[in-house]
Each structure stands twice: as structure tokens, then as C-alpha cells.
């Protein structure tokens, strides 16, 4: 009997404090008009001083568990995608496991920058398909505001904090139809965030902040996401018209629009959360998925294409029948 990974719950959390474009224009030479026109972003949420990736993950995860109507103890595997782990170790997934009061499941983090949630889905789907797990909790939780140089107008306008969660269960019905993930370490220098604690003498002076050549990243993202759309449709022998919803990584509205155009989809078929959340890295597609499902836009039976692109470069997609 074929096993699929079926979505049984989603959750999201956004910190209370909102930083507007006008707030940022008091820090660097920019304007609400420039930021919105070039990125589609107006607001982003900023974690409070006592919040962490694990604390935000806990809130998002509990909402997904509640929607699924299961007990936390039924979860077999927790995968957390984050670029801002609370500690170098234990993993944020282990910290989340403890917060959820689960004694006996497997928990680990993955690091694939903004593509983290798609990578986690791909891993979870392998575990479920081969029978190693039934219920898998995936969380993307990020405090990007602590990695941003608030004096760099090329990056500080883009990012926000938040956590998204999805709970998968084994099912005879589809489910995740396919996942496609890729990495190419050639592009390290276009988008990176140094870890000062691990610095060698050579790069000792580097600050632990996001460093990006935005224009080059933009072009790579548009081209790469176009290719992953083709790869996903071909692998499933599907046409563009078979897709009901596009859930893109929320980095820049112009990148999102280019992928929608490629799919000949109207923006009404695209879940966009970017305007009020900014780029929340690995949390972004999970937050958008949660919004699409909880607003009842996405209905059972709809086919959803999730895609993401991030530092590495890493990129990937997941085609899902909800
Ligand atoms: N406000 C005002 N002007 C700004 C600015 C800001 N916040 N940031 C950059 N500029 C200026 C630049 O200094 C440059 O000025 P110059 O022409 O006098 O040198 C001009 O705007 C154009 O810069 P450029 O970097 O080419 O702008 P852009 O149209 O590419 O927009 C980004 C910049 C960052 C918004 C855009 O490149 C982007 O979104 N890239 C993708 C980033 C991304 O998605 N990263 C995460 C991937 S997961």
C-alpha cells in the first residue's frame, strides 16, 4: 500500500511588535515608497527581548497540534529549520521537544537558510513514505532581526521574525506528491551570515550580520525558481493549470510575481504574506501555508506548489494535494 504525507495541522506565530517602513527610515536613508515599490514590504514583526526561536516555535507548534486534534506525545519526529537556534546545541528541535513535553521522539534541526521548510518537508516525506515515522512536526522559526545590521539599508528593510508549523501524518491518500531540493555552495559570497564565534584569524573582523549582494541574489532567485517550477511539473506529468495555489517564499513581491507569471497564474492564486511580515526566512512558506488554510482559501483536494530559495544557494519545491 502506498504511503503519503498528509497535512493534518498548521500553525503560526508572529511577535507583537511591528516595525514599519517609516520606523526604518528613521534608522537608514530610505523611505516607505522605495521599500514598498522595490520589495512589496510595509511592515515586519520583531521578537521581544525574551523571545527565542524555541519559544516562538512552541506557540506555532501548539496551534498545529490543536488543529490536528492529536496529543503531542503521538509525534514521532520533530524537524526545526532555523538560522537563529537558541543554542549551538542542544538543537532547537530538542528544546521544542522538551517544551511540548514529549519524552520519546526523534528531534533535530536543519540549516538550509530560507529553503529550510521545504528541505524539512522533503526529509519528513522520506521518513513517512518508508514507514520510519507517521506523525512529523515541522517548524520554521527565525529571529532574523538579531542577524540584521540595522545600519545596512540593503538588508534591514527585508527581514522579519516569526514561526510557522505544519504537522504531517501518514495516509493512503495524497498528500505530498513530490519534493525537489537542490544546493550549490558556489554562491556563498552573494548571501551569508558569519558566525563570529567560529571565525578563523582570517575573517575575525567579520560581523555576525546578514551580508548580501541583493541585485545578484534577485536575478538568481528569479531564474532558479523558474527552473524548479518546470522540474516539479515535469516530474508529476502536470500542466500549469493543474495547480490551484502557489505558496512562494516571501522575499520580494517582484520575485513572487515572476514565478506566478511563469505559471500563468493570477496573483489571486498566490498566497502573499510579505507585505506585513517581510522575509521570515524558513518560517515564511509555513506562515503562508497556515494563512491560506486557516482563511479557507485552500480547500481539501486543492493542489499547492510551495517553493523557496535561500543562502547556499539552496532551493526547492513541494507539490502537495491538500
Ligand atoms: N532605500 C533606498 N535606496 C536603496 C535602498 C533602500 N533601502 N537599498 C538600496 N538602495 C539604492 C542602492 O544604493 C542603489 O543606489 P545607486 O544606484 O545610487 O547605487 C539603488 O538603490 C539600486 O540598488 P539595487 O541593489 O540595484 O536595488 P534593487 O532594485 O536590486 O533592490 C533589493 C534591492 C535588496 C530590494 C533587491 O535586490 C532584492 O530584493 N534582492 C533579493 C533579496 C532577497 O530576496 N534576499 C533573500 C533571498 S532568500
Image (cartoon, helix red, strand yellow):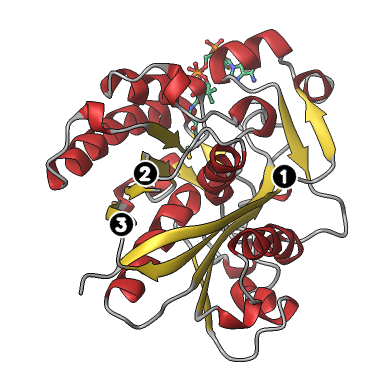
Report the side of 242 relative to 208 (left or right): left
Question: Which residue carries the number 3 mark?
Answer: 174
**Depth-wise, is mark 1 or mark 2 nearer the camera?**
2
Mark 2, ligand 1, within 8 Å: the answer is: no
> Eyeballing the image, is 217 above or below 22?
below
Question: Which residue carries the number 2 mark?
Answer: 301
Q: Quadrant of residue 32?
A: top right
The numbered mark, 3 or 2, whose residue comes first in the sequence reads 3
Give the Cα distance between marks 3 and 2.
9 Å
Give the structural element (helix, strand or loop) at label 1. Answer: helix
The numbered mark, 3 or 1, whose residue comes first in the sequence reads 1
Where in the figure is residue 236, as x and y percent of width and height? Answer: 16, 46
Question: Which residue carries the number 1 mark?
Answer: 145
Mark count: 3
> Eyeballing the image, is 61 above or below 150?
below
Q: Quadrant of residue 275?
A: top right
Report the side of 56 relative to 295 (left or right): right
Q: Are marks 3 and 2 in contact (CB under 8 Å)?
A: no
Where in the figure is residue 200, as x and y percent of width and height? Answer: 54, 67
* Residue 102 appears in the picture as rendered: yes
Which residue is found at the position 40% from the left and 32% from the top?
245
Quadrant assignment for the N terminus: bottom left
Amino acid at each position: 500500500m502506498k504511503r503519503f504525507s498528509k497535512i493534518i495541522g498548521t500553525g503560526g506565530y508572529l511577535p507583537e511588535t511591528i516595525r514599519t517602513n517609516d520606523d526604518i527610515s528613521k534608522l537608514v536613508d530610505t523611505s516607505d515608497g522605495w521599500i514598498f515599490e522595490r520589495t512589496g514590504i510595509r511592515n515586519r514583526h520583531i521578537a521581544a527581548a525574551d523571545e527565542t526561536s524555541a519559544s516562538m516555535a512552541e506557540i506555532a507548534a501548539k496551534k498545529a497540534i490543536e488543529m490536528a486534534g492529536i496529543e503531542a506525545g503521538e509525534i514521532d519526529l520533530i524537524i526545526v529549520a532555523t538560522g537563529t537556534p537558541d543554542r549551538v546545541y542542544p538543537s532547537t528541535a530538542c528544546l521544542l521537544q522538551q517544551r511540548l513535553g514529549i519524552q520519546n521522539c526523534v528531534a533535530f534541526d536543519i540549516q538550509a537558510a530560507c529553503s529550510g521548510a521545504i528541505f524539512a518537508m522533503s526529509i519528513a516525506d522520506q521518513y513517512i513514505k518508508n514507514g520510519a515515522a507517521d506523525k512529523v512536526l515541522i517548524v520554521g522559526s527565525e529571529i532574523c532581526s538579531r542577524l540584521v545590521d540595522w545600519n545596512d539599508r540593503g538588508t534591514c528593510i527585508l527581514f522579519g521574525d516569526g514561526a510557522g508549523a505544519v504537522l504531517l501524518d501518514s495516509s493512503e491518500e495524497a498528500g505530498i506528491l513530490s519534493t525537489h531540493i537542490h544546493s550549490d555552495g558556489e554562491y556563498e559570497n552573494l548571501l551569508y551570515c558569519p558566525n563570529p564565534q567560529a571565525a578563523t584569524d582570517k575573517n575575525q573582523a567579520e560581523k555576525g550580520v546578514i551580508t548580501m549582494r541583493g541585485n545578484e541574489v534577485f536575478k538568481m532567485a528569479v531564474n532558479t525558481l523558474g527552473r524548479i517550477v518546470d522540474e516539479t511539473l515535469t516530474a508529476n506529468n502536470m500542466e500549469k493549470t493543474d495547480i490551484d495555489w502557489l505558496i512562494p517564499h516571501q522575499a520580494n513581491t517582484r520575485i513572487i510575481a515572476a514565478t506566478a507569471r511563469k505559471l500563468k497564474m493570477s496573483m489571486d492564486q498566490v498566497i502573499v504574506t510579505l507585505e506585513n511580515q517581510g522575509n521570515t526566512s524558513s518560517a515564511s512558506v509555513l506562515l503562508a501555508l497556515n494563512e491560506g488554510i486557516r482563511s479557507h482559501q485552500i480547500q481539501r483536494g486543492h493542489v499547492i506548489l510551495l517553493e523557496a530559495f535561500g543562502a547556499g544557494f539552496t532551493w526547492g519545491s513541494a507539490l502537495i494535494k491538500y
